[in-house]
Amino acid sequence: MDGVETTEISSWGPFGRPLFDDVATRRLSRVGVVDIGSNSVRLVIFDGAARSPAYFYNEKVLCGLGAGLAETGRLNPKGKERALAALERFQALSKGFGVTPLTAVATAAMRNAEDGPEFQEEIARRTGISAFIIDGPDEARLSAQGVLLGWPTATGVVCDIGGSSLELAALDQGSVGACATASLGPLKLQDNKRGKGALRKHIDTEMAQFCAEFTGAAPRLFLVGGSWRAIAKLDMARRNYPLKVLHEYRMPPNNLRRTLKWIANTDIATMRQLTGIGAERMGLIPTAAQVLDSVLKHLRPKEVYVSSYGLREGLLWEQMPDDLRERDPLIEACRFAETKDARVPGFGKVLYHFVKPLFPRFPKSRLRMVKAACLLHDVTWRAHPDYRAEVCFDYATRANLGGLSHSERIFLGLALLHRYKNSRAERFDRVLELVEEPLQREAEILGKAMRFGAMFSAQRSDQMGRLKWHPGRKLLVLQIGPESKPLFSEVAQARFASLVKALDADSDVTELVQG
């Protein structure tokens, strides 16, 4: 890296680097972000500076930079060496992937340590990475903006836990409000040699003052950070929850309190065996659980959700133009998948308009799920035909998608499953418990409608024909254009009959009169 390039990068600051100068040409380019935290150092390479970027590469090293900081005022020496080794690796990886320069931010440990600026210079000297040390409010704001990547109109409070600090940020219909930080990270708290009772009292005393500005503003609490995700995994294990996707995992406050109590009374070895969480992370969980219990006590949220999006995603949100921010993250991700993997990119939109008449009473929130399913209806066509339906279901329920709840994931997966198959295996029964029976039926109807509509994928939209649904008469009318008649063969007729049966309706097939 030459001197001119280094000067230019430094002048950008952590938020001004022009990732989105030309959205049209940079949308699919890769962007690398490094988060140097108190406990971990992580590299994320996003495959696209887009509204819903895919995760091309994701690697974390638990370094413990902030261990012992409360006692010494300095970064942990072993943690520094581990962090430098990780950053040297990340720089080499990014060069190999063609992703340079990296955008790197450092949080609580480096901003609070007396040798933080010195280590910042050492990072630049040893690795060539320009790391920007951000303050607490900026960290809170970036985490909140990361949440907005998945919940664009969110209202509530974002709570981001790191090793050394805890950040809160208020959200109001997609706008970030008050931001605050406190030294309530589990790594920092463990450095203070208090007994259990004294530690709990200290946390509650600090939390009462910290949360005062946010009390009553949290109908929904969004949890960001590795310790919260680990607690969510433990909550899933305790509840025997059937879907192992952390993003948008909902934890009712009363259930979460029971999990926190269970954590306090369960030995670490048992919890590790249930979840596979690493020893270093698990060592912080009992303290983190006490912090979360205090957060619930003082904020009193009605709903608690886990967000896999945080500071790193917030860096992307920081630079997004408003028109890109306003787009639906789910639909954008599905469009990208269709463009990359479908046999006939663009047909998903045609298919959506073909099947939409079947759902005249769907609100906008449900119609977006219909649109998402149509965009994804053909992206797993390369899978073996005998497993294609299962691959579809797994793709929707396990893919790194934002902007949909767990029940919506299952609705989407079930619709895609029935796009390829009329029946479903017993292995799906546990997961389907998260979706009410009427929604399961609607997903099956959508899947069978896509299965039929896909028979016309070689036609232009004006040649496909039309579906007309008369719910009061329980009648499905298919109008077929002259160009589509040859495609309405025996297989297509069988698929149409299956759709009619799913609707419990009668049918009528007529010729579409061209206007």
Image: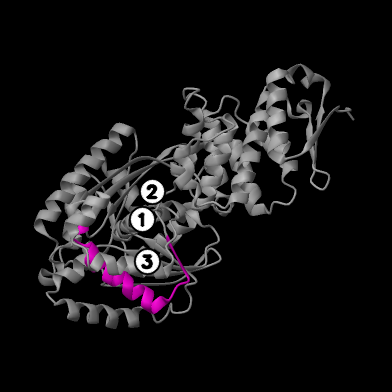
The numbered mark, 3 or 1, whose residue comes first in the sequence reads 1
**Amino acid on which disc 1 is placed:** Met
**Amino acid at pointer 3:** Leu
Residue drawn at 51 percent across, 31 percent down: 389
- Residue 273's place in the image compared with 296, above or below, is above
Callout 2–callout 1 Cβ contact below 8 Å:
yes
Q: The residue tagged with tag 1: helix, strand or loop?
A: helix
Q: Separation of disc 3 and disc 1 at Cα? A: 10 Å
Q: Nearer the viewer, residue 152 or 267?
A: 267
The span from disc 2 to disc 3 (Cα, nearest Å) is 16 Å
* Image location (x, y in percent) of residue 367: 66, 48
Q: Is residue 15 above or below residue 254?
A: above
Provide the residue span drawn in magenta.
282-305
Q: Which residue is depicted at the point 52% across and 67% down? A: 155
- Is 299 part of what is drawn in magenta? yes
Q: Which residue is mark 2?
A: 244
Dominant secondary-structure state across the stretch colored magenta: helix
Q: Is residue 173 magenta?
A: no
Closest to the observer: 323 or 165? 165
Residue at position x 57%, y 24% in the image: 343
Q: Which residue is mark 3?
A: 256
First in sequence, mark 2 or 3: give its number: 2
Return the disc, 2 or 1, that comes first in the chain's sequence: 1
Residue 111 in view here: no
* Frontmost residue, 101 versus 227: 227
Horizontal side of residue 174 vs 106, given as left or right: right
